[in-house]
Structures are given as structure tokens and as C-alpha cells.
Amino acid sequence: MTEIDYLLTGATVVTANENWEVFSPGAVAVSGDSIVGVGPAEAIAVEYSSTMTVDCSGKALIPGLVNAHTHVPMTMLRGLADDLRLDVWLLGYMMPVEREFVTPEFCRTGTLLGCAEMIRSGITCFADMYYFEEEVARAVAETGMRALCSQTVLKFPTPDAPSFEDGLAAARNFIERWKGHALILPSVGPHAPYTSTRDMLQACAALAAEYDVPLHIHLAETEHEVEQSRSEHNMPVIPWVKKHDLFDAKVLAAHCVHVDSGEIRTLHKYRAGVAHNPTSNLKLASGIAPVAEMLQVGLDVGIGTDGPASNNDLDMFEETRLAALLAKGASGDPTVVPARQAFEMATIMGARALHLGDITGSLEPGKRADLALLDLNELHNTPTFRRDADAIYAQLVYVGKAADVSDVMVNG
């Protein structure tokens, strides 16, 4: 019998592995930072022992949720400006306030607050893009969460860089200092094509490719952005960034609301990950991303909350449910994005979109021990039917709430 650090047993274990195995009652064995065993509770008990055996009866044990796109320090700006168009909200309120008030301490405080909220929502990993990303990374590492941290680069002065060149240099230094960290994957974040120059996009892509880290960017978020691209460049957003070598990097593309079938195929061809942000896109009236078509093509589509100033929370249960319902309502087809697929988007597919699918997003031996426990005995979880093999996913997606989360583990 192998001695391990933690034995979590008795739960309904929802693995999100390749075969979509569910073990009830099941168990997960954790040694160091990794999962070493997953399976039926009786079988795992025969193979492993631990002085830290946790009875998880009455709970669901799931992979930690992956928030595929946010700006976590913006918890400090939550409720500052609402019910506005994206351009008015961003250029008229957010960016002027950020230039005046965003400091390293602002980012640290906002990150700590946001991490606490995300942990409570069962999130173990997220993708961030903001200023002073070094402070964000430090705060995330202190909390013990996992994150893709992207240093923002813009073509005009920002709170942490007087020029694009300074922003790019800051991104390079940040990547060099944090690459190889156990919890933080550093990256570069050119904000969007309309806040970038051609040279800037090419330089950011080259930097990401040089260090083999992702590039995090907003793409085709609004119809106005696409119209502006057609007017200025005689082509929509995705072809324009492709022309300027963006896809030389491992791209995480936030939003992609206004993309056509050809652009979706381009994103798939270059193995870009997409972060779908349904609440933010609805709140800012940006539109509804063609998620069903993206999934049909084979794109890795994760689910993101976006920043807490445009959502206004960091609740992935709420976001995952909305992603499923919105796809059905937009298509007129109640069978698209079924509960299991929505759960996949919030876990393993989201991890792949962040280019982290090899280490997190599912409960499998060899993966990092990033997981969450949910109480299934709450009133809203009653009764429970298991006539359908995918019933547990319907329960998690359509009924589950952040308040059901009782425990979270990251990196063991």
C-alpha cells in the first residue's frame, strides 16, 4: 500500500477525463502537488493510505473551475460605471480612472480580493490581463491559486508604462522572472488590435514565441471594432491580426463575438484558445458569440467572467449556466451546448484554451491536484435523479451554485 498526503474519498468524483468517467462513490489520491490515483473508493482504499483521509460523502469532487478571461484587479472598480456601451465605458470611464489611480498597491489589493471571491466560487485557475502584472502574480502566488498572468501592452501611455516600448520591455522582464514558476504562467497581453499598432502586435507575438508562452488579447468583441477594422484595413479583425503574425504565438483570444465561419476556421487552424464571456458581452450589449459553431469546428472554448467592473462578479457557476442557456436561445436549438459540454468548457476545455491542459482541468493521475468539493445535500439540489448518464453534469451546471463549494485545493 502506498502512503500519500491526502485521500479524498466517498464523493461523486467527476473526472472530466477523456472517457468522462464518474465514480460514485469515488476517491482521489494526492501526493505532493499531483494526483496519483482516481477511481472507485474501494479500489483506491486498497492501493493508497494516508493520515489525511477526508470523508467527502454527500459531495461532488470536480476539477477546479478555470476562469478563462478576467482583469482581476478591477474588483477595485466594481460598480463604478454601469449600463454603458463598451467604448463609453472603457474610454470614457475605465481608462481615465486607471491612469489616475492604478498603482502596484491597487493591483495587489484588487487581486487579493478577487482571488478570495474566485476561490469561494470553486475556481482554481484563471487568465488575467492587467497593469503591474508582477504585483498580480505575487498576490496570486500568495493565495496559492494558479494563473496565466498577462502583462498589458498598449500603444499609448498606461499606468505602468509611458510608451509601447516600455510596456513591451516590462512584459519581457516579467516573463523572464516568472517563467517556470509552479503556479504562475507569465505571458504578454497586447490589449486589442484597436489599441495596438502593427509593429506592436508583431513584437508581442515574437516575444511570446521566443519564450514559448501564451499571448492574451481581446479580439472582435464588438461590431464597431469589426467595422472599424474593415474601414481602416479593408479586412475584418481576425485576417488583419493573422496578416501581422499574431498566430505565430499561442493565442488566447477573449470574446470573438463578431467572427464568421472563415475566421472561426482560422482560429482553429492556429490552435488559438477562445474565452467566451457571456455576462460581460450581454451587459455591454456587445453581442452573442457563435459558440455552438466554434465547438462544432473543434475550437477550445473556455468560459470567462471578464473583469468584475463589467460583469460584475467572478462567479463561474453563474457564467457556465449562462453559456449553456445563451447558446440554446441564440440558436433556437435546445440540444446545443448540453450540460456536459458546458462543464467541459469550464474545466478541461478552458484549461486547453489557456494552453494549460497538460497540467490542470481534469482529475487524472499526473495532473496537478487542482480540485473543488461541492455539497450536494443543499435544498436546491433535492431531489436527485440518475436515470441519465449525464445527470450529474445537469445538476452541476443548471443547479450548482458558488455557495455549494465547501473546499478547494490547488497544487495539492
Image (spheres, rainbow, N blue to C red):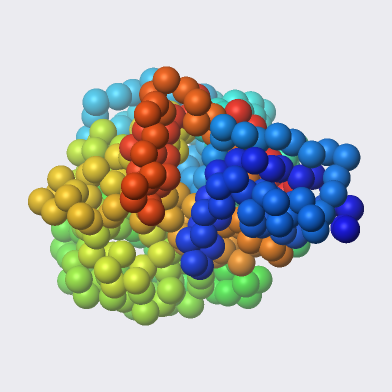
* Residue drawn at the location 54% of the way across and 29% of the way down: 375
Query: How many discs mark residues in the rendered view?
Result: 0
Instruction: Please give the name of the residue rendered at 30% of the width and 40% of the height, measured from the top-left corner.
Output: 322
Q: Residue at x 29, y 47 (%)?
A: 324
Q: Quadrant of residue 108?
A: top right
Q: Position of residue 142 (x, y in %)?
A: 75, 37
* 371 on left or right of 229: right
What percent of the width, then of the height, locates residue 199?
Answer: 45, 69
Q: Nearer the viewer, residue 277 or 22?
A: 22
The N terminus sits in image quarter: bottom right
When asked about the image quadrant of residue 174, the answer is bottom right
Residue 105 to residue 225: above or below: above
Q: Is residue 270 left or right of residue 44?
A: left
For the point 36% across and 68% down, the residue is 299
Residue 78 x, y percent position in the rendering: 43, 24
Position of residue 68 measured from the top left corner of the image (x, y, whole percent): 47, 50
For the residue pair 142 and 153, the one nearer the viewer reads as 142
